[in-house]
Image (spheres, grey):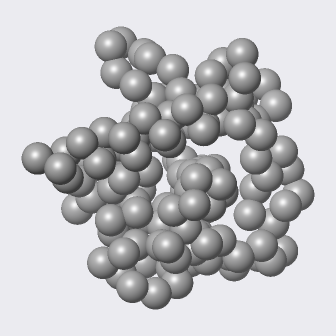
Amino acid sequence: MLNIYAHAAQTLYMKTKIGTKSNPLALKTPPQTSEYTMHVDEKEGKEVLVCTVGKTVLHYDIRCLNDLHAMLLAHGDWMELGSADEQKPAKEGTVEAWGRSENNPVGGWYGLKKGLRGRFGMYVPPLMEALGLAEVTHDAKGNKMRAI
């Protein structure tokens, strides 16, 4: 039972830190070249991460945070981010590929807006870093992450 309460407390903490539409969390892409925001909202009765990049709005299933953290812990080492648009194939063995794989816990895309489901490896890792769940490299290209 204690694990359930600890998990609920951690989830509440994460949602509070991520913020709301009126007070979103400001982040930068892994190379530190672009700014964007994230906040938690509800869509069709389900909590989602809302990622706003300029005028583009992407949605990700909020459970990606716990699922990706668990996968990275099991992986035990650095993993390349491999960010790619939905229309482009993701490099195998990357966070992006895992975020759209039939073998992940949701059986496919964590991105929820058709046509804008990619870029999971670009926008979710900095959020996880801000939440203290992961380390992310900040090079011009080929960035990686690992669980903390």
Could you tell whether 18 is left or right of 5 in the image? right
Picture coordinates of residue 148, whole percent (x, y): 50, 73
Q: Residue furthest front?
A: 2
Asked if 68 appears above or below 80 in the picture, the reply is: above
Could you tell whether 105 is left or right of 77 in the image? left
Along the line of sight, the residue nearer the viewer: 12 or 26? 12
Residue at image coords 40%, 63%: 69
Residue at image coords 85%, 61%: 32
Q: Residue furthest left?
A: 1
Q: Residue furthest top?
A: 44
* Quarter of the image where one finds residue 46: top left
Along the line of sight, the residue nearer the viewer: 22 or 103? 22
- The reply to whether residue 24 is visible in this rendering is yes
Picture coordinates of residue 135, whole percent (x, y): 61, 72
Picture coordinates of residue 84, whole percent (x, y): 60, 58
- The reply to whether residue 60 is visible in this rendering is no
Along the line of sight, the residue nearer the viewer: 75 or 3? 3
Residue at image coords 35%, 81%: 75
Could you tell whether 90 is left or right of 9 in the image? right
Q: Residue furthest bottom?
A: 77
Picture coordinates of residue 2, whole percent (x, y): 17, 50
How many numbered discs?
A: 0
